[in-house]
Image: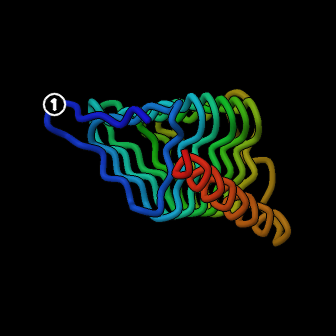
Amino acid sequence: MPVIEYLGKVPKLHPDSYVSPNAFVSGDVELGEGSAIFDYAVVRGDLSSIKIGRYSNVQDNCSVHAGVTPCTIGDYVTVGHGAVIHGATIGSYVIVGINSTVLDGAVIGDNCIIGAGAVVTPNTQIPPESMVLGNPAKPVKKLEEHHKLTIKLSAESYAELARRYKQIFKQR
């Protein structure tokens, strides 16, 4: 697993976190308990810091990069396949949909779903409990309780998947 120091900044990985052998993590990055970085994801804290909270996952082919502003991903966040998060703040209990983009200075509140392919433009503020769709992304409705449960279950299922992969790679 390529986890590398960059200009004296070494990623801090919680012992219960998982980084795929095919992922890349560098610089000022902190991974929380139960968090996971899956295959071919890139998490680069070379320009500023990145903090990924507890039981959050960054799926295959994602890019998380801190630009001029730091990048923060809260607890129980699922960052779907191919998504890009650049210098943004993502609250807790959020799904960032497949191939969506969240750009510099954007702030996503807690309990949100960013739909697949959505583009959250720079400095956009998304209120808590929003379902967000489109390009540019806009809130289209307030989340219901079943959506919130789906968000939590998604994060928990990926944490379990990561735990299993971690065990497999320890056995090799």
Q: Residue at x 79, y 47 (%)?
A: 140
Task: Categorize mark 1 by other alpha carbons within 10 Å: few (<14), some (14-19), many (20+).
Answer: few
Q: Residue at x 40, y 43 (%)?
A: 71
Identify the amino acid type marked 1. Leu
| Horizontal side of residue 152 vs 101, given as left or right | right
Question: Residue 23, how many percent across, how many down?
Answer: 50, 33
Question: Quarter of the image containing the C terminus?
Answer: top right
Splitting the image into 4 quarters, where does residue 167 fall? Answer: bottom right
In the figure, 143 relative to 169: above or below? below
Residue annotated with mark 1: 7
| Horizontal side of residue 42 vs 149, given as left or right | left
Viewer-proximal residue, 32 or 2?
2
Question: Residue 40, how many percent across, how many down?
Answer: 56, 28
Question: Residue 133, how many percent across, how many down?
Answer: 76, 39
Viewer-proximal residue, 20 or 102?
20
Splitting the image into 4 quarters, where does residue 97 fall? Answer: top right
Question: Quarter of the image containing the N terminus?
Answer: top left
Splitting the image into 4 quarters, where does residue 111 fall? Answer: bottom right
Label 1 sits on a secondary structure element that is loop
Q: Name the colouring of the figure.
A: rainbow
In the figure, 44 relative to 141: above or below? above
Q: Residue at x 73, y 35 (%)?
A: 98
Viewer-proximal residue, 36 or 168?
168
| Horizontal side of residue 26 vs 163, given as left or right | left
Q: Is residue 103 visible?
A: no
Question: Residue 65, how many percent across, how many down?
Answer: 42, 32
Q: Is residue 26 visible?
A: yes
**Residue at the left extreme, as displayed:** 8
